[in-house]
Each structure stands twice: as structure tokens, then as C-alpha cells.
Image (spheres, rainbow, N blue to C red):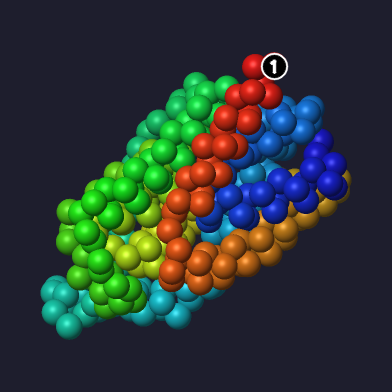
């Protein structure tokens, strides 16, 4: 059973690491090990806790972009009736999101459990976290080498993305099924390599994340309604609320951050954190 303190720390960690390009799954494996918490991460109660924190994060993302989602959903519905996307850039953006979500969604349903059971080992996760940092740095180098100088342009610009680019970003996102790779990091790296500005890449990443995280949480949502233990209900509530608050401030910070900054600070963090974890585990 998680303590109040552990639920609070893990909830805040989930809300931050799910949206920052530093791997929430990787941190959920590494943090308890570093802090020497005696937690059985395969226990049903812990899985219920993780579902609640992911669901809370997805709800915050959806509400944060609620106006956009209303326009996107309306645009997709309109495209189904008119059977074309002419002068309907929100509809086209919606279909781009659907296409970008499909690879990770399908692969997640087929292989997520197997991949995470095999690779959710602290030493391996630390190595993959280092690889995540190297991937972020590499994406920045390639983008600069290709002299990409596009500027942000919001939803209308994103709607002009090539279908192949959306599929590429979606395939990149599939790497996050491996603990230590970040979903935000992989999608942003894919967006940068497709020629987009950091702000546009981050915006598309957050829009892409919402249905994926929400769908994954909803599939396991029935478990939340089976909670009969008051102590478990308390820790789950603490984790979900703290994750929601952390996610809200995280997305606000990152939107401002990527208007002028790059992925390099997160790349340095991932490499440094991975190396430190390896030292701790090997000593």
C-alpha cells in the first residue's frame, strides 16, 4: 500500500514526466528504486493508482485544449458529411491526429504488456533513458544541419502537415512503449525532423497525446470503480489530484518554453539522470 507521501510524489512525478520529454514510465520504474520504496509494481492496487494518475493527466490535457477539440471534432464530423476537407483545416487536423495516433495505439494493444514486462528493469530503463536523451539531442542536430527555420503557425499550419509526416510522428511515438523513451520526446523529435518549429511540434504532441492517454486509461477505468478499501481510495485520490495539478502547470510551462527554447536541456537531463541511476544501481 502506498503512503500519503509516496502517492503525492508519484502523482506529481506522473503529471510532470508524462508531458515533459523525460519518460513518465521510466520515472515510475526508477524513482521507487532510487528512494528504496518497497513497492510491488505488479500489484493490482499499484496499477489502479497508475490508471488514475494517467486518467487525471489526460483530462487536464483535454480541458486545456477544449476549444480546439470542439473545433477539431466538429471539423471531422463535417468532413464525414461533406466527404472532403476543402476549407476545413480543423477537420484535416483531426484526421492527422487520428492517423498519428493509430500506430502507437495498435502496437500498444498488441505488445505494450509484453514489452513493459520484459524491459521494466531499472538497469535497462536507465540505459534507455540515456538513449532518449541522445535521441533528443540528435533531433536538434539534424534539424539545425538541415537549416530548418520554420516558424510557428498554430492549428492552420499544423493542418497542412503531410499525411506521411503525421504517420512518421505516430511511428516515432511508438518508441515510448519502451520504458525510458518519452512519448512527448519521441513525437517532438519526429515533428522537428518533419520540419516543424518547437512550438508547433509540442502542440501537435499534446493534441496527439490526449486521445491516446485517455483511451488507454478508459480501457482500464472499470478497475477504479472496484475500489472498496478506503485507504486505497485515499491514496488514489491524492495521486490523481496531484497528477492533475502538476500536468496543468507542466503544459502551461512547456507551451511558453518551446516558443523560444529547444529540447537540449531535457536531453542533458535524461543522459545525466540515466548515468546517475546506473552508478547507483551498480554500486
Outermost residue toward the top in this view = 283
Which residue is more in the foreground, 142 or 46?
A: 142
Q: Is residue 77 visible?
A: no
Q: Position of residue 124 (x, y in %)?
A: 52, 23
State the residue position of label 1.
283
Q: Position of residue 163 (x, y in %)?
A: 18, 58
Circle 1 SS class:
loop
Total marks shown come to: 1
Q: Does residue 155 appear left or right of residue 270 in this picture?
A: left
Judge whether 181 appears above or below 116 on screen. Answer: below
Which residue is more in the foreground, 42 or 16?
A: 16
Image point 78% across, 55% down: which residue? 238
Judge whether 186 appears above or below 121 on screen. Answer: below
Quadrant for residue 250, please give it.
bottom right
Image point 23% across, 61% down: which residue? 148
Q: Position of residue 61 (x, y in %)?
A: 52, 65
Amino acid at each position: 500500500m502506498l503512503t500519503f507521501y509516496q502517492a503525492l510524489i508519484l502523482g506529481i512525478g506522473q503529471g510532470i514526466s508524462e508531458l515533459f520529454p523525460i519518460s513518465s514510465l521510466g520515472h515510475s520504474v526508477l524513482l521507487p528504486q532510487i528512494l528504496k520504496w518497497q513497492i510491488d509494481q505488479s500489484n493490482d492496487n499499484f496499477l489502479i493508482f497508475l490508471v488514475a494518475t494517467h486518467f487525471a493527466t489526460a483530462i487536464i490535457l483535454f480541458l486545456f485544449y477544449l476549444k480546439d477539440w470542439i473545433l477539431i471534432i466538429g471539423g471531422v464530423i463535417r468532413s464525414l458529411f461533406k466527404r472532403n476537407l476543402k476549407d476545413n483545416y480543423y477537420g484535416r487536423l483531426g484526421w492527422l491526429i487520428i492517423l498519428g495516433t493509430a500506430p502507437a495505439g495498435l502496437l500498444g494493444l498488441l505488445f505494450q504488456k509484453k514489452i513493459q514486462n520484459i524491459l521494466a528493469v531499472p538497469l535497462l530503463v536507465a540505459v534507455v533513458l540515456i538513449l532518449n536523451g541522445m535521441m533528443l539531442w540528435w533531433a536538434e542536430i539534424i534539424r539545425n544541419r538541415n537549416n530548418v527555420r520554420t516558424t510557428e503557425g498554430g492549428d492552420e499550419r499544423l493542418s497542412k502537415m503531410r499525411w506521411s509526416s503525421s504517420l512518421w510522428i505516430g511511428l516515432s511515438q511508438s518508441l515510448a512503449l519502451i520504458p525510458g523513451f518519452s512519448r512527448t520526446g519521441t513525437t517532438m523529435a519526429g515533428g522537428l525532423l518533419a520540419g516543424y518549429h518547437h512550438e508547433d511540434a509540442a502542440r501537435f504532441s499534446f493534441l496527439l497525446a490526449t486521445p491516446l492517454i485517455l483511451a488507454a486509461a478508459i480501457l482500464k477505468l472499470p478497475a477504479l470503480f472496484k475500489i472498496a478499501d478506503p485507504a486505497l481510495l485515499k491514496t488514489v485520490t491524492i495521486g490523481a489530484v496531484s497528477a492533475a495539478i502538476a500536468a496543468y502547470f507542466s503544459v502551461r510551462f512547456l507551451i511558453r518554453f518551446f516558443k523560444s527554447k529547444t529540447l537540449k536541456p531535457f536531453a542533458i537531463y535524461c543522459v545525466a539522470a540515466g548515468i546517475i541511476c546506473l552508478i547507483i544501481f551498480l554500486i
